Image: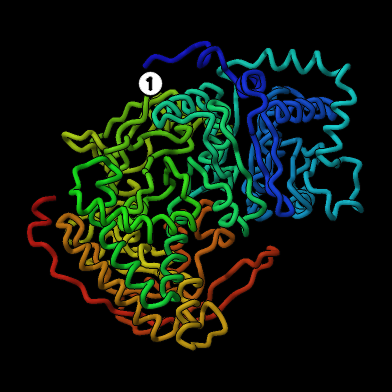
């Protein structure tokens, strides 16, 4: 594998890319942020001036080369600037999940040893102050939003804006030192440290170099022909590698505009206003949008409902083929064009996808029905397979070769191999440097030749070269009869239904599969309102007989679909419960990126799983929960256990194994 030693085109750091952008197209928009209902805009030249002032401010308060600067807050230009400014002074930015509770924040803060912290607002400052009894290395807290901060002790705390003003005022003293530090940055210096989601244990600090970030950004931008004319909406957690590569790596390489929504609550409205040309979202975002579409259609007039379902049936038949440039008859194209005028176009405009040129979903497998729904509308949604340790990209889907059942071919400059156990390994310029302060995990994940074990099981299709993911390697198992157990396959089918928010399948080593299901409160609540069904809580609605009946129908439909797959037909759901609470990151049941911590859930709800297998009709349980303010509590519930009809299992399945 050939790797550039001097950087992509001589550009070997984010500050170098920033300088190029400010010099070559300084008047082009670089950042927009919606505040008080109005979009504010900064050009590349203006952004470069702001970032330099911030870097000078960091020097003023004593930031040294190699220091770690934590960044905690929502997506704002100032927070992205702080990460580039940190690199300018030779420091390492470490973005945190802004919704992390104090306990999670304490671990990461202690582990990375951050001495300086950029906080978004009073809420984040309060969390840092709370953990300072345990974390003693913090020298200075900076905050972006001044609201509520007037009466705080400012001996070691300043507004970020004030630090920037001090940097500007002292630039004659500090310019030479800043220029020296910028000039000293190399291609193999650390660009950012990102923490893994901690699905199986404590989060690990993934050290990514400038080489990792810039080579990955360059290769992926070339693959999808990205230009500086793109518009993206940056709304995902800044601590997630997906946001970093799209909102910083690719944005700086291509020079396109990063748009920051006013708040998480206004994200969908802001999405429609911007109409991004390039978009990235985990499956949950697309699931939520589809749920909202289906809810609105239930409330629409009978004529609109009939028209929607009529044209969507046609789109399902030919929309994907038209998008991929495959042969479609003139009559079908004409009908599709009419559907686009009456249904698809207005729907895309409502979703915010009217200018959508290319988009990706990753992080979790997306249900094939959901994936096909968007592509049938003419939306060029594709899947990629990636990891934090790969600087995102392992495989991507080329235009014209997009399928719901694969994650594409190796990304540019990426090599893939499958070991004898079926585990996927890769090697690329994006392979991480190390896990911070964890040489044992580094050695067990990345070998001496640079191959990284993904922990995922899959295979490469003969003929197409596409990679198919079966499941997490540790989650793939065997049923008691020897047939394959792959929970994600079934869980994704269940989550296609707007009523189902989350599903967790159990059955490894057992004679049958059972499941936990979370209802989607928005969808079920809307149904309850339309049917004059009163409820006082999530728990009450989750246990309603008509809700259980509806979910049972969904499970049985999924069983029919699963039964058609000879290899996985043993994974049909025999019994299930609708849980009395949503799985929550604050309770440790899912990660901040909404991945189920399967082992934790299995241990926590062992009593419910036992009841699912012992033939009980009901089970009483007490569950510890964490409130938003960090207090612990408990909720009691008696859950109804539901039986679902299963289909005959394919007889040749075991032999095929």
For the N terminus, the quadrant is top left
Q: Position of residue 345 (x, y in %)?
A: 41, 55
Coloring applied to the structure: rainbow
Give the percent coordinates (x, y) of residue 365: 37, 50
- Mark 1 falls on what kind of element? loop
Residue at (29% x, 57% y) in the render: 315
x 56%, y 18%: residue: 188
Local crowd size for mark 1, using a 10 Å CA cut-off: few (<14), some (14–19), many (≥20): few
Residue 73 at least partly seen? no
- Note whether 559 is above or below 38 in the view shown: below
Residue 513, given in percent of the width and then of the height, sits at: 28, 67
Residue 404 versus residue 639 in the image, above or below: above
Residue 463 placement, left or right of 520: left
What is the x, y in percent for residue 537?
Answer: 56, 80
**Would you identify the image quadrant in which residue 110 lies?**
top right
Total marks in image: 1
Identify the residue under disc 1. 449
**523 above or below 189?**
below
Front-most of 326 and 145?
Answer: 326
Please give the name of the residue rendered at 30% of the width and 60% of the height, measured from the top-left corner: 490
Is residue 262 shown to the viewer in this render? yes
Front one among 402 and 257: 257
Which residue is found at the position 72% from the left and 16% from the top?
Answer: 181
- Quadrant assignment, res 606: bottom left
């Amino acid at each position: 594998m050939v790797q550039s030693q001097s950087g992509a085109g001589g550009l070997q750091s984010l500050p170098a890319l920033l300088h190029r952008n400010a010099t070559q197209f300084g008047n082009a928009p670089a950042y927009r942020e919606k505040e008080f209902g109005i979009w504010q805009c900064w050009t590349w030249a203006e952004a470069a001036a702001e970032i330099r002032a911030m870097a000078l401010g960091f020097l003023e308060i004593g930031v040294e080369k190699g220091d770690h600067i934590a960044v905690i807050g929502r997506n704002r230009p100032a927070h992205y600037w702080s990460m580039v400014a940190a690199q300018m002074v030779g420091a390492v930015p470490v973005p945190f999940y802004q919704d992390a509770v104090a306990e999670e924040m304490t671990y990461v803060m202690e582990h990375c040893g951050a001495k300086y912290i950029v906080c978004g607002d009073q809420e984040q400052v309060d969390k840092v102050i709370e953990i300072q009894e345990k974390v003693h290395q913090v020298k200075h807290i900076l905050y972006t939003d001044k609201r509520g901060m007037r009466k705080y002790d400012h001996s070691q705390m300043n507004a970020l804006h004030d630090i920037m003003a001090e940097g500007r005022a002292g630039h004659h003293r500090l310019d030479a030192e800043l220029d020296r530090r910028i000039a000293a940055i190399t291609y193999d210096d650390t660009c950012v440290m990102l923490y893994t989601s901690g699905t199986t244990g404590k989060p690990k600090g993934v050290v990514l170099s400038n080489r990792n970030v810039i080579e990955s950004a360059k290769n992926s931008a070339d693959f999808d022909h990205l230009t500086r004319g793109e518009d993206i909406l940056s709304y995902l957690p800044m601590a997630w590698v997906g946001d970093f590569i799209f909102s910083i790596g690719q944005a700086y390489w291509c020079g396109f505009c990063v748009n920051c929504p006013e708040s998480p609550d206004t994200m969908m409205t802001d999405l429609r206003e911007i109409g991004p040309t390039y978009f990235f979202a985990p499956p949950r975002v697309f699931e939520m949008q589809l749920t909202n579409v289906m809810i609105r259609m239930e409330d629409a007039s009978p004529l609109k409902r009939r028209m929607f379902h009529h044209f969507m049936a046609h789109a399902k038949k030919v929309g994907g083929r038209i998008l991929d440039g495959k042969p479609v008859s003139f009559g079908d194209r004409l009908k599709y064009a009419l559907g686009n005028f009456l249904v698809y176009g207005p729907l895309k405009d409502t979703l915010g996808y009217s200018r959508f040129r290319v988009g990706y979903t990753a992080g979790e497998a997306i249900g094939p029905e959901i994936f096909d729904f968007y592509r049938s509308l003419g939306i060029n949604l594709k899947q990629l397979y990636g990891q934090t340790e790969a600087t995102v990209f392992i495989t991507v889907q080329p235009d014209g070769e997009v399928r719901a059942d694969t994650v594409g071919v190796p990304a540019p400059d990426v090599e893939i191999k499958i070991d004898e156990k079926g585990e996927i390994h890769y090697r690329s310029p994006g392979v991480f440097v190390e896990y911070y302060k964890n040489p044992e995990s580094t050695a067990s994940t990345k070998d001496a030749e640079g191959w990284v074990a993904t922990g995922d099981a899959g295979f490469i299709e003969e003929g197409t070269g596409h990679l198919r993911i079966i499941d997490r390697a540790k989650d793939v198992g065997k049923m008691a009869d020897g047939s394959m157990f792959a929970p994600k396959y079934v869980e994704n089918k269940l989550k296609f239904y707007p009523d189902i928010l989350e599903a967790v399948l159990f059955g490894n080593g057992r004679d049958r599969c059972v499941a936990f299901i979370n209802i989607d409160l928005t969808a079920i609540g809307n149904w309850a309102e339309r049917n004059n069904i009163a409820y006082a809580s999530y728990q009450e609605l989750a246990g309603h007989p008509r809700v259980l009946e509806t979910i049972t129908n969904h499970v049985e439909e999924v069983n029919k679909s699963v039964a058609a797959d000879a290899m996985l037909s043993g994974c049909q759901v025999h019994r299930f419960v609708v849980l009395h609470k949503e799985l929550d990151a604050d309770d440790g049941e899912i990660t901040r990126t909404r991945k189920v911590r399967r082992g934790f859930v299995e241990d926590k709800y062992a009593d419910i799983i036992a009841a699912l297998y012992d033939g009980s009709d009901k089970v009483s349980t007490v569950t510890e929960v964490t409130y938003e303010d960090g207090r612990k509590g408990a909720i009691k519930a008696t859950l109804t256990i539901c039986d679902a009809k299963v289909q005959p299992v394919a007889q040749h399945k075991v032999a095929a194994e």
